[in-house]
Image (cartoon, helix red, strand yellow):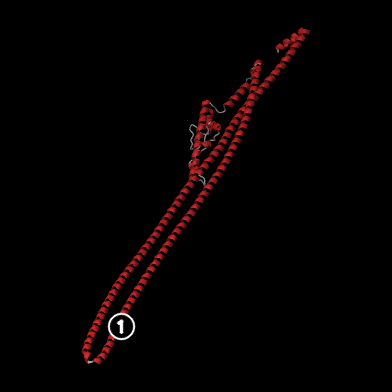
């Protein structure tokens, strides 16, 4: 109460805030974060700094060059550790409360006991001092043994801590080596995978080039076949036209030959007729000559014969003219029929030529459509291939990005685990430092108590020596008195009475 009143008197306007783990404000960043002795003791015993219990926002983990997921991983990792640490120190504080721990109780008790021991030394008698000396001696021996044991424990603990630190360092080095090896193997696998993908891409490009060459070769062969077919059709058409022209020429020649033969026949018949006429005229002249010889006798008969011959000639000429007419008519009919046939044949040839041209046009259109369809199919296949490649590239990029994210997160978690190990080592060092400080404090207290006991023992020994000297002096005085009493009883009695009076 006096200390509280003094503190209020010293600071009338400022109220001291009691900050403990019970009412710990995890969002407070103003110093002091904790000022409760038990809370601070719990933090020391767990090797945890009060700053590690303060809440941090996710934005406080932002660093240049890191992504949002890494920032979130760091924040979640820190928050989980913070809550775990807060639970640990609170449990430690509850344990201190259940143990009844008070700050600096041991030192006060030791000091008070030492003061009581040094303050009451004058009121003890010799027997109690001797008993206390023996007890103090035993306590000193027990303290020395305990101190030796604690020193051995501290040395053993230091050796064990060093071994643990070396083992952790070896483990860290082994983990670092494993991580480097794993990263190297991962890089090798990634490189091998990329090489396989690149080889696949190269093989794919080569296969596409080969397919393209095959398609071009097939298209070229198809085009060449079509050109050969067209050339064959043109050659066949030319040969057919040549045959048609040949047949026309032959027909014309046949017509000319027939006409010539007909004309020759007509001319021959005319020559025959003329020859007969000439022969008949010669016969007539002969007959006339004969008849001149007969004159009158045969005149009538000759005239009759002449008339009959004339009639026969006329009749033969009429027959010949009729025959010529019939032959001309037949010739013209044949010519008309040939013309009709020729016209029909030419029409048929034109129709056939037109049909072949249409067929050629249709085949050309079909070929053009086939080429267009093939080109459309090629374009569609090329588009599909391109889309597949783009989709594969996107998927590959997405997979690579996901793998990069997972690898980055894994590396970050490994870094956090490594940092946790280092932090655990630091925390263990802090705990060991606290234990060493506590052990040193206990040793110092024991040293002070031992020194006090040694001082007390020395005083007791000095008193005992003084007591013995006094006993010796008194014994010598008694002996001297006895000697004097033997030698001079009266004088010795007076001296003893004087000594008793004094």
On the image, the x and y values in percent for residue 124 come to 64, 17
Is residue 288 depicted above or below 182 in this figure?
A: below
On the image, the x and y values in percent for residue 76 come to 49, 39
Residue 127 position by quadrant: top right
Q: Residues within 10 Å of mark 1 (few under 14, many from 20)?
A: some
Q: Is residue 12 visible?
A: no
Which of the pair 116/235 is nearer the observer? 235
On the image, the x and y values in percent for residue 251 come to 34, 73
The quarter in which the C terminus is drawn is: top right
Which of the pair 100/5 is nearer the observer? 100
At 22% from the left edge and 90% from the top edge, which residue is drawn?
297
At 39% from the left edge and 66% from the top edge, which residue is drawn?
236
Q: Is residue 327 visible?
A: yes
Residue 107 position by quadrant: top right
Indicate left or right for 405 with 452 as reference.
left
On the image, the x and y values in percent for residue 275 come to 30, 84
Which of the pair 405/299 is nearer the observer? 299
Is residue 431 depicted above or below 366 in this figure?
A: above
* Number of callouts: 1
Is residue 256 depicted above or below 212 in this figure?
A: below
Furthest-right residue in this view: 487
At 73% from the left edge and 14% from the top edge, which residue is drawn?
474
Is residue 489 depicted above or below 105 in this figure?
A: above
Determine the secondary structure under disc 1. Answer: helix
The residue to which callout 1 is attached is 271
At 53% from the left edge and 26% from the top edge, which residue is drawn?
99
Indicate left or right for 474 with 157 as reference.
right
Residue 295 position by quadrant: bottom left
């Amino acid at each position: 109460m006096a200390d509280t009143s003094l503190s209020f008197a010293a600071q009338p306007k400022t109220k001291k805030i009691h900050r403990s783990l019970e009412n710990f404000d995890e969002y407070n960043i103003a110093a002091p974060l904790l000022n409760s002795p038990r809370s601070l003791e719990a933090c020391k015993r767990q090797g945890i700094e009060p700053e590690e219990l303060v809440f941090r926002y996710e934005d406080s983990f932002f660093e240049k060059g890191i992504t949002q997921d890494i920032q979130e991983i760091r924040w979640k990792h820190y928050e989980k550790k913070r809550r775990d640490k807060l639970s640990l120190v609170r449990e430690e504080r509850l344990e201190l409360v259940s143990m009844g721990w008070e700050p600096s109780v041991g030192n006060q008790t030791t000091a008070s006991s030492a003061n009581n021991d040094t303050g009451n030394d004058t009121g003890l008698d010799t027997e109690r001092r001797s008993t206390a000396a023996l007890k103090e001696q035993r306590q000193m021996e027990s303290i020395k043994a305990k101190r030796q044991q604690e020193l051995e424990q501290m040395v053993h603990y230091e050796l064990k801590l060093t071994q643990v630190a070396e083992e952790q360092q070896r483990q860290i080095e082994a983990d670092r080596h494993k991580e480097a090896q794993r990263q190297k193997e991962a890089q090798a696998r990634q490189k091998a995978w990329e090489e396989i993908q690149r080889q696949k891409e190269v093989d794919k490009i080569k296969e596409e080039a080969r397919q393209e060459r095959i398609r071009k070769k097939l298209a070229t062969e198809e085009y060449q076949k079509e050109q050969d077919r067209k050339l064959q059709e043109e050659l066949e058409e030319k040969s057919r036209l040549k045959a048609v022209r040949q047949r026309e020429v032959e027909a014309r020649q046949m017509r000319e030959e027939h006409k010539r033969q007909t004309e020759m026949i007509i001319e021959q018949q005319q020559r025959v007729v003329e020859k007969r006429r000439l022969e008949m005229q010669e016969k007539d002249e002969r007959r006339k000559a004969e008849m001149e010889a007969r004159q009158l006798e045969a005149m009538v008969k000759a005239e009759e014969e002449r008339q009959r011959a004339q009639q026969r000639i006329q009749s033969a000429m009429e027959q010949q003219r009729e025959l010529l007419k019939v032959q001309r008519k037949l010739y013209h009919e044949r010519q008309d029929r040939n013309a009709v046939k020729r016209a029909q044949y030419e029409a048929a040839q034109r129709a056939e030529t037109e049909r072949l041209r249409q067929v050629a046009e249709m085949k050309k259109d079909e070929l053009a459509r086939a080429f267009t369809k093939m080109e459309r199919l090629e374009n569609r296949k090329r588009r599909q291939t391109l889309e597949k490649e783009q989709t594969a590239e996107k998927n590959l990029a997405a997979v690579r990005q996901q793998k990069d994210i997972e690898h980055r997160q894994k590396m970050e978690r490994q870094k956090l685990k490594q940092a946790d190990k280092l932090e655990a080592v630091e925390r263990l060092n802090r705990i060991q430092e606290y234990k060493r400080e506590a052990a040193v404090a206990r040793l110092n207290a024991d040293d002070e108590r031992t020194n006090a006991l040694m001082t007390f023992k020395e005083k007791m020994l000095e008193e005992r020596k003084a007591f013995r000297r006094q006993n010796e002096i008194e014994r010598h005085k008694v002996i001297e008195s006895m000697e004097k009493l033997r030698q001079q009883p009266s004088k010795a009695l007076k001296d003893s009475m004087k000594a008793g009076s004094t």
